[in-house]
Image (cartoon, grey):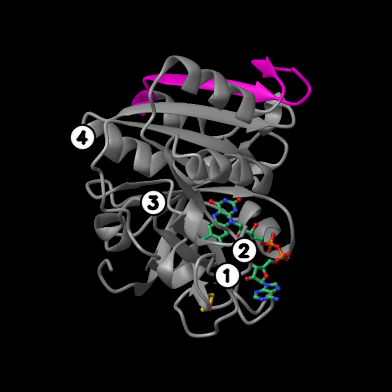
Amino acid sequence: MGVHPVYRSATVVEVKQAGPQYVDLLLREPVISRISQPGQFLMIRAWPGVDPLLPRPFDIVQCNAQEKTLRLFVKVEGRGTRLLKELLPGTAVRVTGPLGRPISDYACSSVAFLVRGAGAAAVVHLGEACAQRGIAVYSILSASTASRLVCRDYLQPSSAQLMVATDDGSEGYRGLGTDLLDRLLERQSIDRVYTCGSRRFARHVQRLDREGRLAGFVFLEGLMACGLGDCHGCAVRKRNEPGYYLVCRDGPHFPIGEVEL
Ligand SMILES: Cc1cc2nc3c(=O)[nH]c(=O)nc-3n(C[C@H](O)[C@H](O)[C@H](O)COP(=O)(O)OP(=O)(O)OC[C@H]3O[C@@H](n4cnc5c(N)ncnc54)[C@H](O)[C@@H]3O)c2cc1C
Ligand code: FES
């Protein structure tokens, strides 16, 4: 496990609209920005009172200990994320983190990221950590249409190659990111694949993992009430033995053969 999470006040530095559906949110908070590791997330409450009742979980896209900043990338969907979109610079918000199990095993020479939509937010920090260790990073970003391709500018610097797929062909390859992964595997040996943002992608990576072609990992992003392992609302069934994992405590990333998708 990583260090214990802390409950802190953070200040909104910048809220940028990123395409029609996304918000790029920069916060200043000195502790979580210093101790966060790849694979971790935080819970944010950015409204006074108890409506909505629960904080919302988001991946820590980037953290900068010197600047004391944390970056989140938010898909605006329901009430909580609409309130995040309305935040103004200087506003104080409450954050709990870092949460989840940090990724600590970097014993490989190449990784591929197969992500869809906001799923890209889960792998940016990991990509930076891999690149720093000399691990070759291949990023495959996929979305229904070009305006839903996110975090590209944050993934680009750590990627040896960044590939794009859109369902409607508005940018890059017309079709699914899984086709690009299959093509990559034909010409390149890849040790690990991390996937996030699509059950269909996860099942594809699970098949490749089962065939022994690579080691697959999945980021699970279900409903979360506490983020701390207390409510058991985020339980997912173990695949090879009876029982459950808690996504917030044991994940959110898992070896893909170990969880029911
Ligand atoms: C670990 C993790 C990381 C994530 N990272 C990102 C990210 O980086 N970017 C991104 O765009 N999205 C991310 N998500 C998804 C994001 O948290 C949701 O899209 C967001 O919470 C939706 O909030 P809302 O207010 O728009 O939606 P609403 O539908 O209004 O509310 C959803 C929220 O309600 C609560 N809730 C509702 N029903 C239940 C229930 N039955 N049990 C428990 N809680 C319930 C949960 O807090 C849930 O997050 C992540 C999710 C997880 C679990
Ligand atoms: S969200 Fe409460 S135990 Fe995971």
- Amino acid type for the residue under numbered disc 3: Leu
Q: Earlier in the sequence, mark 4 or mark 3?
A: 3
The picture places residue 51, in percent across and down from the top left corner, at 69, 78
Front position among marks 2 and 1: 1
Question: Label 3, on which residue?
Answer: 70
- Amino acid type for the residue under numbered disc 4: Arg
Would residue 169 be counted in the magenta stretch? yes
Question: Label 2, on which residue?
Answer: 222
> Decide: marks 2, 1 in contact (CB < 8 A)?
yes
Would residue 31 be counted in the magenta stretch? no
| Range drawn in magenta | 157-175
Q: Earlier in the sequence, mark 3 or mark 2?
A: 3
The picture places residue 70, in percent across and down from the top left corner, at 39, 51
Q: Earlier in the sequence, mark 1 or mark 3?
A: 3
Question: Label 1, on which residue?
Answer: 236
**Alpha carbon distance from label 1 to label 4:** 32 Å
Name the residue rendered at 45%, 34% in the picture: 213
Give the crowd class for mark 4: few <14, some 14-19, many >=20 residues within 10 Å: few
